[in-house]
Image: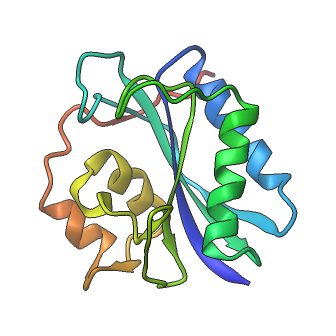
């Protein structure tokens, strides 16, 4: 089993329900077990900023899938949940990114690991730091990378009740 981390995001429809559905879809994937889940965080849009706010979360998983097979499982879950890719960094019902895979380095046309923007995106690092603050990525821990970034506008979602 390999340890990996995924990033989840949604900014269309019932965002929290979509993140829950993504977790359920991933948990039902043969060869993959969800081992940790961060809280949901309300985050401002990044890249293309003319869109609604996002809800983001991070997952820790154990898997027997290869990095590329894990990517395909994430893309299949996105498709089942209604993801349509219309524009780069645009609105999406669900986004599931492979952030890190057992320390593997991959760089091809389909997959870059660790995720190429991971250490630049507070909206990914804040939830990831909740479940894996000491995870080493690119010679520094998640917490160290996050300490260099602006976290403004990133807030944990209030849980009803």
- With respect to residue 44, does 13 lie above or below? above
Q: Depth check: 110 or 51 in front?
A: 110
Residue at 41% over, 28% down: 54
| Residue 20 place in picture, x, y as percent | 69, 36
Residue sticking out furthest to the front: 109
Colour style of the rendered protein structure: rainbow
Q: Is residue 146 left or right of residue 115?
A: left
Q: Position of residue 51 (x, y in %)?
A: 32, 16
Which quarter of the figure is the C terminus placed in?
top right
Q: Does 24 appear above or below 134?
A: above
Q: Quadrant of residue 138?
A: bottom left
**Left-right relation of 26 to 44:** right
The location of residue 126, given as percent across then percent down, is: 34, 52
* Image position of 91 (left or right of 21): left
Q: Taking 33 as reference, is 12 above or below it?
A: above
Number of disc labels: 0
Q: What residue lies at 32% left-to-right and 63% top-to-bottom?
A: 116
Image point 66% across, 82% down: which residue? Answer: 2
Q: Quadrant of the N terminus?
A: bottom right
């Amino acid at each position: 089993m390999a340890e990996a981390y995924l990033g989840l995001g949604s900014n269309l429809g019932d965002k929290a329900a979509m993140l829950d559905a993504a977790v359920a879809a991933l948990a039902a994937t043969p060869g993959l077990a969800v081992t940790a889940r961060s809280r949901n965080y309300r985050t401002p849009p990044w890249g293309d900023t003319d869109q609604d706010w996002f809800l983001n979360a991070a997952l820790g998983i154990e898997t027997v899938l290869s990095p590329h097979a894990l990517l395909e499982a994430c893309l299949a879950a996105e498709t089942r949940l209604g993801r349509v890719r219309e524009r780069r960094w645009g609105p999406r019902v669900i986004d599931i990114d492979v952030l890190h895979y057992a320390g593997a380095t991959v760089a091809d046309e389909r997959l870059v690991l660790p995720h190429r923007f991971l250490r630049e995106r507070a909206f990914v690092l804040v939830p990831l730091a909740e479940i894996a603050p000491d995870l080493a990525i690119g010679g520094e821990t998640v917490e160290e990378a996050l300490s260099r970034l602006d976290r403004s506008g990133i807030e944990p979602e209030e849980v009803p009740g």
